[in-house]
């Protein structure tokens, strides 16, 4: 009788542990799915940002676009009314 009670208790514990393992396995699968979805969303956003380029690339004029007589930078060409260093053209 005592052995039967002990066996029932052990089977009950085994069933509880089996259920706990199943729940943990399901939680792990859910976490993997969430992780993958988060990564894919991040990757899509990253690719989108890279495709846009950086603001510096879009807004900075190229050297060829600058006029030599444009006022502003005293180191390039002549500024209005001032004496600047004239760099040789390449």
Image (cartoon, grey):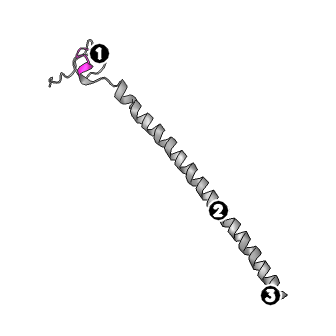
Cα distance between the residues tagged 3 and 1: 100 Å
- Label 1 sits on a secondary structure element that is loop
- Label 3 sits on a secondary structure element that is helix
Q: Main secondary structure of the magenta part?
A: loop
Residues at discs 2 and 3 in contact (Cβ within 8 Å): no
Which segment did they paint magenta? 64-71
| Left or right: residue 86 compared with residue 42 | left
Q: Nearer the viewer, residue 25 or 83?
A: 25
What is the number of the mark on residue 71? 1
Residue ID for mark 3: 3
Residue 45 lies in magenta, yes or no?
no
Looking at the image, is mark 3 or mark 1 earlier in the sequence?
3
Q: Please provide percent x and percent y for residue 9.
A: 78, 78
Q: Residue furthest right?
A: 1
- Label 2 sits on a secondary structure element that is helix
Give the image quarter of residue 85: top left
Residue at x 64%, y 62% (from the top left corner): 24
Q: Residues within 10 Å of mark 2 (few under 14, many from 20)?
A: few
| Left or right: residue 67 compared with residue 54 | left
Q: Please provide percent x and percent y for residue 30.
A: 61, 53
Q: Residue furthest top?
A: 81
Residues at discs 3 and 1 in contact (Cβ within 8 Å): no
């Amino acid at each position: 009788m005592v052995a039967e009670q002990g066996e029932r208790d052990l089977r009950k514990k085994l069933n509880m542990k089996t259920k706990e393992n199943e729940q943990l396995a399901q939680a792990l699968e859910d976490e993997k799915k969430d992780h993958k979805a988060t990564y894919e969303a991040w990757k899509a956003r990253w690719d989108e940002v890279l495709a846009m380029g950086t603001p510096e690339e879009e807004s900075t004029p190229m050297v060829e676009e600058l006029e030599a007589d444009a006022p502003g930078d005293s180191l390039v060409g002549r500024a209005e009314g001032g004496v600047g260093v004239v760099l040789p053209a390449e």
